[in-house]
Image (cartoon, rainbow, N blue to C red):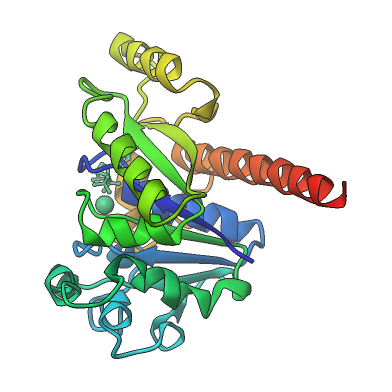
Amino acid sequence: MAKIISIANQKGGVGKTTTAINLSASIAAAENRTLLIDIDPQANSTSGLGYSGENKSVYEVLVGTETIQDCIISTYMPFLDLLPSTINLVGAEVELVNVDVREFVLKKAIQAVHDKYDYIFIDCPPSLNMLTLNSLTASNSVLIPVQCEYFALEGLGQLLNTINIVKKHFNESLSIEGVVLTMFDTRLRLSHQVADEVRKYFGNKVFETMIQRNVRLSEAPSHAKPVILYDAISVGAQNYIGLASELMKRNLVESTQKDNSNEQ
Ligand SMILES: Nc1ncnc2c1ncn2[C@@H]1O[C@H](COP(=O)(O)OP(=O)(O)O)[C@@H](O)[C@H]1O
Ligand SMILES: [Mg+2]
């Protein structure tokens, strides 16, 4: 069964989509069966991988006119599939208003493909709306990208609050996968200060791997490629490969612990 991870932070421009594309691609490159679900109407994960709004998308899945299997695309990477987004998704929020248990629509849809994947990542929109609620309800955990900038921690209280509301009402076992520091600039004292502050606040939830500011990461989407295919030896590619291996290691430990406790 897949581990399902929402990539969320209601702040825009913190590196959610860059992380969604490049973490998914790096995990897929290690031969894990991976699905990236783009649930942001801006569809940047979709276009960043070279696909367009002409495809059947997560919108059709949410409003119930298509099955999830019919909307998933096999990408040019052997282990990476994509459930694309479209701008139509803006309307989904309104269309879901009259649906019973509307927070569970995505969760139900994913159940049909759960067994086909090792990892499912969901790129969330920059708000705490019904789309984000659907994503958190469907997930095992949340990965929070935090940009090494002024006010990095601002608004995170709101996100943690939303996570607690989801735990209480829709998804008891939702956990925090971790916090990843993005756009780190080794030369800037501010970057180091923010990293220290975030580590003080979140402790060992913060990934050791930091994603540095790297121009290759911002160029790759216009070439419709994840950075490991665009420039594999760039700092950005190496950082995301590092993050992927840290995440895989953590999950290996967790599942071994689970197996052991089942045996006892
Ligand atoms: N580590 C990085 N180095 C350089 N540019 C980055 C990095 N991470 C993200 N960017 C750029 O910053 C902008 C916002 O990132 P994005 O991943 O789209 O954020 P979000 O999805 O949270 O809105 C994009 O133009 C992206 O290319
Ligand atoms: Mg985004």
Snapshot quadrant of residue 191: top left
Residue 101: x percent and y percent? Answer: 31, 71
Above or below 258: residue 187:
above
212 horizontally vs 31: left or right: left
Snapshot quadrant of residue 145: top left
Above or below 182: residue 61:
below
Can residue 248 be spotted in the picture?
yes
- At a point 29% along the width and 77% down the height, the residue shown is 62
Residue 142: x percent and y percent? Answer: 44, 46
87 horizontally vs 104: left or right: left
The total number of labels drawn is: 0
| Quarter of the image that includes the N terminus | bottom right
Residue 239: x percent and y percent? Answer: 51, 37
- At a point 65% along the width and 46% down the height, the residue shown is 251
- Residue pushed farthest right? 264
Q: Camera-side residue: 82 or 179?
A: 179
Q: Camera-side residue: 154 or 262?
A: 262
Above or below 253: residue 263:
below
- At a point 34% along the width and 64% down the height, the residue shown is 224
Snapshot quadrant of residue 161: top left
Can residue 211 be spotted in the picture?
no
116 horizontally vs 223: left or right: right
Residue 111: x percent and y percent? Answer: 51, 75
- At a point 54% along the width and 39% down the height, the residue shown is 243
85 horizontally vs 90: left or right: right
